[in-house]
Image (cartoon, rainbow, N blue to C red):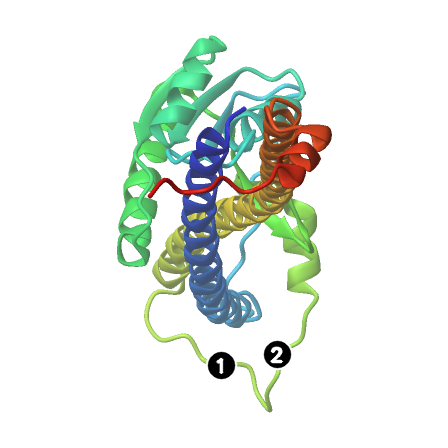
Amino acid sequence: MTLESLNRRIKTTAELRDIVSTMKMLSSVSVGQYERALLSVREFGKTVREGFLGVLLNDAFHFRPQEIKTPQPNTLIVAIGTDNGLVGRFNKDVLTHAAHAAAGSPVRLICVGKRMGLLARARTHPVDDIYPISNSLKEIMTLASMILVTIDAVIAREKIEKVMLCFNQRAAAAVQPTTQQLMPLPLPQYREFKKQKWDGPSIPMVAGDKRRVFQALIHEYFIVSLTHALTSSLAAEHYTRMMNMQQAEKNIDESLDEMNREYQQTRQAKITDELIDIVSGAESLKSASPLTKDAKQAKRKQPPRKEKK
């Protein structure tokens, strides 16, 4: 390979590294943004849970979650993916995990992400609706409300007994798919929740119709759960992209080091060849000269010519 072509390759690779570094930096900023949003969602969820507890501790109100008695209930899964690239098996892992979580039950899907919807249909899963994923934090709660309306419609139409959320979330230094039962409220979790004690001097009073208040809290719980899943998926997506860009940056640096070494070796070899050509040319000129050593000595011994008057 010539020096010119090597130089072009090094320049192109360096420009690619700048792009990768910029994408890594943007993903890093986005991860922090969505992680802070997750903290806010968790705080709001804590407030909703406290409202639940305040209503449940009231002796005048009785509630028991519906139990799933069918061995393989009709299941609706909200599969949350991404429409952006550079995230590897992000969508495939969610869809595979959703299939395992259903455990052989009849499954229908609501897909968040057009690519997720295309992938689900390619695997012949029944898809009731597909929503484009939004990277705007302001639109996540609106999207959660739209999905909840679709869930209600599918439950009424298809006699769904169980609704689950399936999404990727960040766990320590890795991203893993997870599932969460949305409907009905998990009975074991409800029993543990009801055992909690109110953190205060007295149990709060509930104004108005306790059942309507509880229904409003249930609605907020569904919205918070969907918002949390959507935000967790976005945080996991950008974290995955950041790690992929970091690995790509490392690979590019290794390639640049190798190309720079090759460039220096090629350049040194070319300089050496040029020096050899110069020395060889000088030796050739020296050996081809008509004035040999004996001829030079004879010329010096000849008497000087006399000039004619």
Above/below status of 145 relative to 263: below
Judge by depth and name the residue closer to the eye, 28 or 115: 28
Observer-nearest of 209 and 143:
143
Image position of 197 with respect to 217: above or below = below
Q: In the picture provided, is 45 more to the left or to the right than 128?
A: right
Q: Which mark is residue 19?
A: none
Determine whether label 2 and label 1 are within 8 Å by CB: yes
Amino acid beneath label 1: Pro
List x then y, in percent, for residue 167: 53, 39
Left or right, 83 with respect to 196, comes to left
Q: In this view of the protein, can residue 23 be seen by the observer?
A: yes
Q: Secondary structure at mark 1?
A: loop
> In the figure, is residue 30 to the left or right of 168?
left
Q: Position of residue 105 (x, y in %)?
A: 60, 17
Would you say residue 258 is visible in this rendering? no
Residue located 33% across and 49% down the image: 135
Q: Amino acid at mark 2?
A: Trp
Q: Position of residue 263 (x, y in %)?
A: 58, 38
Residue of label 2: 198
Cα distance between the residues tagged 2 and 1: 9 Å
Q: Residue furthest bottom?
A: 201
Place residue 34 in its image quadrant. bottom left
Q: Earlier in the sequence, mark 2 or mark 1?
A: 2
- Mark 2 surroundings: few (<14), some (14-19) or many (≥20) residues within 10 A: few
Disc 1 crowd rating (10 Å Cα; few below 14, some 14-19, many 20+) is some
> What residue appears at the point 59 percent right and 38 percent down from the top-left corner?
271
Q: Quadrant of residue 133?
A: top left
Q: Residue furthest front?
A: 309
Residue with the mark numbered 1: 204
Q: Nearer the viewer, residue 232 or 305?
A: 305
Residue drawn 55% across the image and 31% down it: 88
Please state, as top left, top right, bottom left or bottom right, where the N terminus lies in the image: top right
